[in-house]
Image: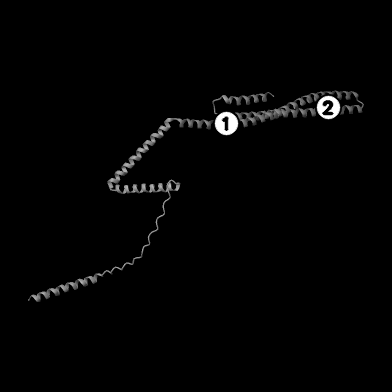
């Protein structure tokens, strides 16, 4: 029974010692459970040996009891033969075997009771080990939860550090400076290429579109009166345009020019004849 009390103390001391240890609790718990399982295996071997002793004593008791019965049978056989002296010797031998059988029976009874106690203690030890495994799982879960909470707290403490926000502000200012420089370079490039006027009109169109959207949103929210419907357009009388005179072809124009030239020549000749 000493082994089970030592194992129980070992389990209790190991589990309690984990609280004050600085090693990794998960590794330590796994190692303790492994050691406990190894010790349970050794305890089972010792219990099995005790059971074997109990069975051996029971078999010896049966053997000696059988020998006593055999010598009693021989004593009866000697009496039938009329030999009382031989019968007395046989009874004396039977008495020896009876005493030996009685001693073995007493030892077997005590060993059987001890084996029953060992079996019970072994079951209790096995239950304690299973309980230790469950407790190990709970402790490991608690350890992981504590580590997660610690990581969250470290992250939160880092966020509360003003230096982090100052870094964000400094980076924001730097990016603003880069954007301003990029816009300045773009304006210089537009002025150099003569596109500044087109850029101004694009800016005006964007601002005009934004103003129209703002007015439409105000009317939708009821902040401005609805837009008046446009007045009906006056009927437009259909005007039939006279067809434009067909343009003369190039050949006709050349022919007309020749006729004018011939007419001028004829008029000149007529003037010369009249002068003569």
Label 2's element?
helix
Residue for badge 2: 68
Label 1's element?
helix
Q: In this view, does 236 lie to the left or right of 4?
A: left
Q: Residue sitting at 58 percent across and 25 percent down?
A: 19
Q: Residue sitting at 67 percent across and 24 percent down?
A: 5
Q: Residue sitting at 40 percent across and 47 percent down?
A: 215
Q: Is residue 209 above or below residue 262?
A: above
Residue for badge 1: 142
Number of residues whose C-alpha sits closer than 10 Å to that of mark 1, classed few (under 14), some (14–19) or many (20 or more): few
From the top left corner, tell me how far across and down residue 190 is, in percent.
30, 46
Image depth: mark 2 or mark 1 in front: 1
From the top left corner, tell me how far across and down residue 20 is, in percent.
56, 24
If the image is split into quadrants, where does the C terminus sit? bottom left
Q: Which residue is the extreme one toward the left?
A: 276
Number of residues whose C-alpha sits closer than 10 Å to that of mark 2, classed few (under 14), some (14–19) or many (20 or more): many
If you read the primary sequence from the N terminus, does the residue marked by circle 2 or circle 1 appear first?
Answer: 2
């Amino acid at each position: 029974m000493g082994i089970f009390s030592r194992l129980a103390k070992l389990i209790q001391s190991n589990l309690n010692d984990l609280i004050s240890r600085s090693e990794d609790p998960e590794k330590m718990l796994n190692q303790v459970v492994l050691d406990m399982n190894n010790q349970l295996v050794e305890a089972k071997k010792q219990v099995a040996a005790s059971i074997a002793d109990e069975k051996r004593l029971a078999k010896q008791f049966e053997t000696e009891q059988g020998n006593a019965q055999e010598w009693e049978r021989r004593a009866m056989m000697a009496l039938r033969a009329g030999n009382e002296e031989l019968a007395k010797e046989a009874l004396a031998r039977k008495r020896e075997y009876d005493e030996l059988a009685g001693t073995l029976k007493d030892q077997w009874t005590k060993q059987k009771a001890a084996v029953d106690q060992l079996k019970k203690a072994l079951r209790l030890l096995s239950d304690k080990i299973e309980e230790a495994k469950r407790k190990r799982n709970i402790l490991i879960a608690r350890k992981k939860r504590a580590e997660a909470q610690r990581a969250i707290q470290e992250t939160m403490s880092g966020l509360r550090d003003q230096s982090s926000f100052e870094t964000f502000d400094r980076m924001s200012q730097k990016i603003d400076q880069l954007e301003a420089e990029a816009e300045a370079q773009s304006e210089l490039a537009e002025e150099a290429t003569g596109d500044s006027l087109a850029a101004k009109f694009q800016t005006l169109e964007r601002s005009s579109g934004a103003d129209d959207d703002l007015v439409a949103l105000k009317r939708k929210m009821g902040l401005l009166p609805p837009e008046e419907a446009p007045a009906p357009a006056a009927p437009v009388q259909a005007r039939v345009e006279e067809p434009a005179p067909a343009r003369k072809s190039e050949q006709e124009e050349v022919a007309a020019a020749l006729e004018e030239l011939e007419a001028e020549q004829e008029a000149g000749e007529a003037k010369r004849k009249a002068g003569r």
